[in-house]
């Protein structure tokens, strides 16, 4: 009877550990995919004619919600010359995994002559 109890406890512990490992692997896969998509969105957006504003982007199966935000940036050089045509591009992602809300973002400043 004692051996059966110990075996049951070990089986439950092993099952729990396997489940946690699988959940962690899924989260890591999702985060890697999101980072890749964010970088792709930044690159694609930077190649377009930029206009300040917010745009929702459909990517993949729709589990992850992507938004790009373009803002004009005012900057001056050390000599006081105003730099024009600078844009801050932010790509944001939000999704739900393992019962938790998750989000990530990436940002770049580009010059478009």
Image (spheres, rainbow, N blue to C red):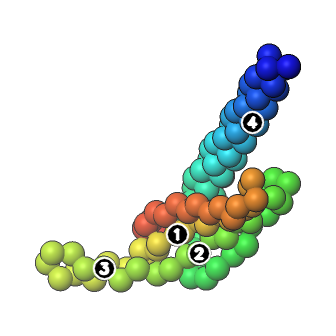
> Residue drawn 81% across and 25% down?
5
Camera sees residue 45: no
Quadrant of residue 57 within the rendered picture: bottom right
Indicate the position of residue 43 as horizontal and vertical percent values: 57, 55
| 80, 11: nearer the viewer | 11
> Residue drawn 81% across and 58% down?
63
Q: Which mark is residue 75?
A: 3
Q: CA distance from mark 4 to mark 3?
A: 54 Å
Indicate the position of residue 37 as horizontal and vertical percent values: 66, 52
Label 2: element kind: strand
Q: CA distance from mark 3 to mark 1?
A: 15 Å
Location of mark 2 (residue)? 69
Q: Is residue 93 left or right of residue 82?
A: right
Q: Which residue is outermost to the front?
A: 1
Q: Is residue 43 above or below residue 57?
A: above
Circle nearer the viewer, 4 or 3 = 4
Q: CA distance from mark 2 to mark 4?
A: 41 Å
Contact, mark 2 vs mark 1 (Cβ under 8 Å): yes
Label 3: element kind: strand
Circle nearer the viewer, 1 or 4 = 4
Q: Which mark is residue 16?
A: 4
| 8, 47: nearer the viewer | 8
Q: Which mark is residue 89?
A: 1
Q: Tag 4: Cα neighbours inside 10 Å, few (<14), some, or many (≥20)?
A: few
> Residue drawn 76% across and 22% down?
6
């Amino acid at each position: 009877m004692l051996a059966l109890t110990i075996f049951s406890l070990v089986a439950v512990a092993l099952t729990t550990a396997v489940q946690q490992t699988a959940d962690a692997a899924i989260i890591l896969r999702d985060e890697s995919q999101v980072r890749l998509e964010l970088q792709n969105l930044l690159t694609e957006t930077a190649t377009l004619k930029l206009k300040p504003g917010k745009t929702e982007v459909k990517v993949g199966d729709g589990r992850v919600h992507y938004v790009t935000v373009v803002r004009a940036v005012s900057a001056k050089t050390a000599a006081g010359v105003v730099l024009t045509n600078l844009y801050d591009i932010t790509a944001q992602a939000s999704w739900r995994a393992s019962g938790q809300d998750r989000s990530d973002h990436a940002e770049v400043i580009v010059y478009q002559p």
